[in-house]
Structure formats: structure tokens, C-alpha cells
Amino acid sequence: MPLLLGFVHFDDVQQLQVPAGWSVAVLVFGAVYTIVPTALFGQTAGKLAVGTRVVVDGEGSLPGWRRSGVRWLVSEGLGELPFVGLVISLVVLGSLLVDPRRRGLHDKAAGTIVVRV
């Protein structure tokens, strides 16, 4: 987001000269943007736009704070780890392709599923 808004320049990102504060701010923003609306409403703005919602698998209820946090941590939080984050992200997203119900590892870890509204 800061890159898109012009606060961080692309050359700085390529040379790994992004201040640590920006990295933490982007991580916190992503967590809040994802966890809060998922816990309270089952959907972020993106899910609302495409007509999907995250629910507890087998129940259909809202995921709540713990499940939303676990889901974010597995799908996005672990992807921020140095050196292995990209591999983790690819495995999590790749798991969507092999699961017949299209549940990624983040959904399996949290006990959730994405459904059409």
C-alpha cells in the first residue's frame, strides 16, 4: 500500500532499504484489514465485492476472532517470514488447487470455508 501511495519508492524496495517501521505498519494494516471484518462479518471488502463469505466449516456461523486470526496468520502472516515466506505462501495458495472443496491450508487450520453469499 505505501508503495502504491508513493510513500515508499520502488528502488528502495528493490534495494531492501524500506524502513522497518513501514514493514511493521503494512503488516499490522493487513492484519487489521483482514481479521476484524472477517471476525465480525465474515468478509473483507474484497469478499463483499465478489459475493463470498468466510464461515465455520460444517456450521455456517461467523468465524470469530480466533479463527480469523489463525486464518490470517497461516495465509498472510507466515508469508512475511524472511527466506521462506514466499514458499509458504505458494504452498498455502497451491493447496487450493488440489482440494476438491477449494479449502486452502489457512482454511483447514482455522476450520473455515469460503462460500458464495
Image (tube, rainbow, N blue to C red):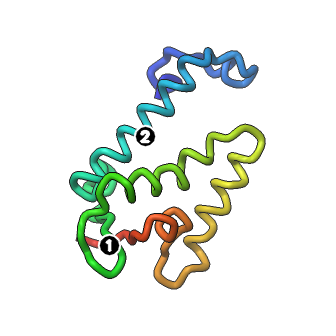
Which label number is shown at residue 104?
Answer: none
The residue singled out by tag 2 in the image is 31
Q: Which comes sooner in the sequence, label 1 or label 2?
A: 2
The crowd level at tag 2 (other Cα within 10 Å; few <14, some 14-19, many 20+) is some
Q: Quadrant of residue 112?
A: bottom left
The residue singled out by tag 1 in the image is 115
* 102 sits to left or right of 85: left
Residue positioned 51% across, 50% down in the render: 73
User: Which corner quadrant holds the C terminus?
Assistant: bottom left
- Mark 2 is on which residue type? Ala
Secondary structure of the residue carrying numbered label 2:
helix
Residues at marks 1 and 2, CA–CA distance in whole angstroms = 21 Å
Residue positioned 49% across, 76% down in the render: 102
Residue positioned 62% across, 40% down in the render: 80
* 16 sits to left or right of 45: right
Q: Count the marks.
A: 2
Residue 20 image offset from top left, x and y in percent: 61, 18
- Seen in the picture, residue 34 relative to 16 is either above or below; the reply is below
Secondary structure of the residue carrying numbered label 1:
strand
Residue 13 image offset from top left, x and y in percent: 67, 23
- Mark 1 is on which residue type? Val
- Seen in the picture, residue 43 relative to 20 is either above or below; the reply is below
Residue 10 image offset from top left, x and y in percent: 63, 22
Q: Nearer the viewer, residue 4 or 52?
A: 52
Residue 105 image offset from top left, x and y in percent: 56, 67
Furthest residue in direction bottom, as rendered? 100
